Amino acid sequence: MIFQTEHSVIKSCFAVRLFLINRNYQRSHLTELFECSQSPEACKILQFNLSFLVGVLAFFSITMGLKNEIVVVTGSSGFLGQHIVKLLQERDDNCAEIRLFDKQPYENKLGHKEDKPMKHFVDDIRDIDALLKAFSGADCVIHCAAVIEIGLFPNVQEMVSANVDGTRNVIEACIQKNVYRLVFASTTDMVCGSEHIFYGTESTTPIPTTFMIGKYGETKRESEKLVLEASGKLLANGERSLRTLSIRPVPLYGEGDKHFMYQILRYAKKYNGYYLRIRSLDERLQICYVGNAAWAHIKAKDRLVEDETISGEAFFITDDTSIIDIHEHVRQYMNARNFNVSSYIFPYWLAWIILSIICLIIRIINVFVKFEFEIPAVSQLNYMCSTFFFNRSKATLRLDYIPIYNAEEANNLSMNYYKSVNL
């Protein structure tokens, strides 16, 4: 009799499993069965199945939630932001809706698919009310918006206001609107100082006291600190905590670049298509294709769901682009535009002295007469003649990040852009 009862209970349990999964029944409905069981053995079976059901329902809840994500991208019209939007559209099965937040209206400059709905918010991250509107109902924010000024006369106040205060607003909006995931687009510039870095890891690379790239690196460090310290803060509804992490890519190249390789090409064009090679000793500056850096942000978004222990962490991002003399990377794009590259190498120390004197004279003149003079800052020269390269093992192991564009694909895509972009 007991055997028959237990057998029927077991059959009922499996029926209840299917019923609960299909009908989304509440856990309390199983209590009646639990109380009606006719033996301790049957109770154990029911208890096991109850645990199983709770796990299955939780799994399906998370999985179904992932498949219908609403993702906000701040700085969506920028270099990195455009590529993140492209990959959200074309390679992210979890994203169902994209919200574009930028001061500049979004234009699809990469020619990607637009199958998923995109909502446009043309506004500033320094406007907390605009952020609250854009973040309402969202699941994740990928925060790329920033002011980048590394020239001779950077607008420091603007960078502090946008990069630091704006990031503070983004964090506050996430908390108020119960957006529990925040991925921050940082940079290795925040760890680059006067010392060379060889295969730097997150745990062995200290934050410098002075930043090679000036105030930009400092503001990115301050904003990253805000993001990582926000990890674990309780959201407004009190149901869960904020999960954050920071992605630190090395300097980026590729379609849409307006800062790194693009600026080098502009300087060459300004000086009659001539590029002067300046070299220190044996510098190696690591660069990364922008599409791979964008993919790292999407992997981070998904991993924050699966592994909350990565919250509050920072990750260096690189790809398989060769770590060689940066001038060799530059040369191929110069050749594509029929620019000339000097056959001789100008010594770094002499270039540093000459450029320092010129910059000093320009600064003095600018005190009395404001004028535009396009010349690299000394910090940019120092950066080009330094050695900085990093180890991405942590991102590989904990974010499951693997570059999706190999070196040849990245170079071909970039070549098409750099040889035709308007300088």
Image: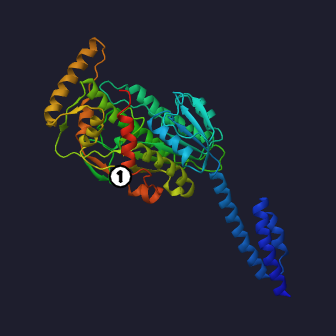
Can you say which quadrant of the picture contains the C terminus? top left
92 in relation to 98, above or below: below
Q: Which residue is mark 1?
A: 320
Q: Position of residue 383 (x, y in %)?
A: 26, 38
307 in relation to 170, above or below: below
Callout 1, which amino acid?
A: Asp
As drawn, is 294 to the left or to the right of 283? right
> Number of labelled discs?
1
As drawn, is 335 to the left or to the right of 109? left
Task: Name the residue at the top extreme.
Answer: 369
Dot 1 falls on a residue whose secondary structure is loop
Q: Is residue 26 visible?
A: no
347 in relation to 122, above or below: below
Q: Position of residue 149 (x, y in %)?
A: 37, 29
Q: Position of residue 6 (x, y in %)?
A: 80, 82
Residue drawn where x is 83% and y is 86% of the image: 2
Query: Which quadrant would residue 137 be assigned to in this image?
Result: top right
Which of the two residues, 118 or 174, is positioned nearer the viewer here?
Answer: 118
363 in relation to 284, above or below: above
Query: Which quadrant would residue 306 be assigned to in this image?
Result: bottom right
